[in-house]
Image (tube, grey):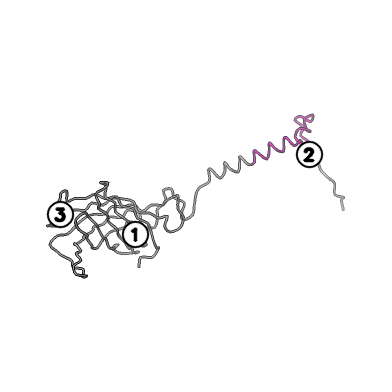
Amino acid sequence: MCPLREVSFQFRIDAANNEFLDSSTMKVLLGCLMCFVLNLAQAFAISGGPWSGGSKIVGVVGTYAGVMHDVVVGSNNLGIFTLSVPQTGLATGSVLIFTGERTFSGPITALADPNTDIVEGTLQGIPVVTSGGQTVTTLNCHADGSLNAKVRLNKKSLGISAVRLRGTSHVNTTGGCCTVPPCQTDYTVHGFKQSESSS
């Protein structure tokens, strides 16, 4: 058997500066360079995971809730909605619209495109009147509208509520419900995903 012996390597470029390469200054410099290289590698890394953002397609299936704010500040018009997007078929939900004159309640029917993350739908509300402790709905007028929104990720949030709905809605009040023009209202839509299931 051969005895083990220690092998040392010498830099032949400038043997006189060998002491500088072994000095604490050089060790600090190499440590700083390694920190820089590791941080730079992370900066250029490809992001991944379910909440990474970027241009990745977001899953649209699930249950959403949201609010519709009138674009005219101080108009006292507001809408709230829920929307259930199934794996197959049309998305369905409910909407409640509060105006300065009436409250409308009705359904939303929408289509959610899984390739573009766009939700497009229609809504219709009929007036809700409460009289003598009973709720009475009248059909002599109604509110019809459209909903256009994009499902996207909020980079500031984590979890299921990071999936957001952002878009617009246009509602037209018809019949005798609108006594003070304009009878058309534009809303901004802000919603979030509550559940991955559509039930």
Checking the image for residue 115, the label placed there is: none
**Front-most of residues 14 and 68:** 68
Quick one: label 1 or label 2, which is nearer the N terminus? 2
- Marks 1/3: CA distance? 27 Å
- Hey, what amino acid is under mark 2? Phe
For disc 3, the marked residue is 178
**Front-most of residues 192 and 101:** 101
Whether tag 2 and tag 3 are in contact, CB under 8 A, the answer is: no
Which residue is depicted at the point 17% across and 55% down?
Answer: 173
| Predominant SS of the magenta segment | helix
- Hey, what amino acid is under mark 3? Cys
- Hey, what amino acid is under mark 1? Ala
- Marks 2/3: CA distance? 91 Å
For disc 1, the marked residue is 65
For disc 2, the marked residue is 9
Identify the element where label 2 is drawn: loop
Asked if the stretch drawn in magenta spans residue 110, the answer is no
Tell me the magenta residue range.
9-34
Identify the element where label 1 is drawn: strand
Quick one: label 2 or label 3, which is nearer the N terminus? 2
The quarter of the rendered structure image containing the C terminus is bottom left
Looking at the image, residue 147 sits to the left or right of residue 42; the answer is left
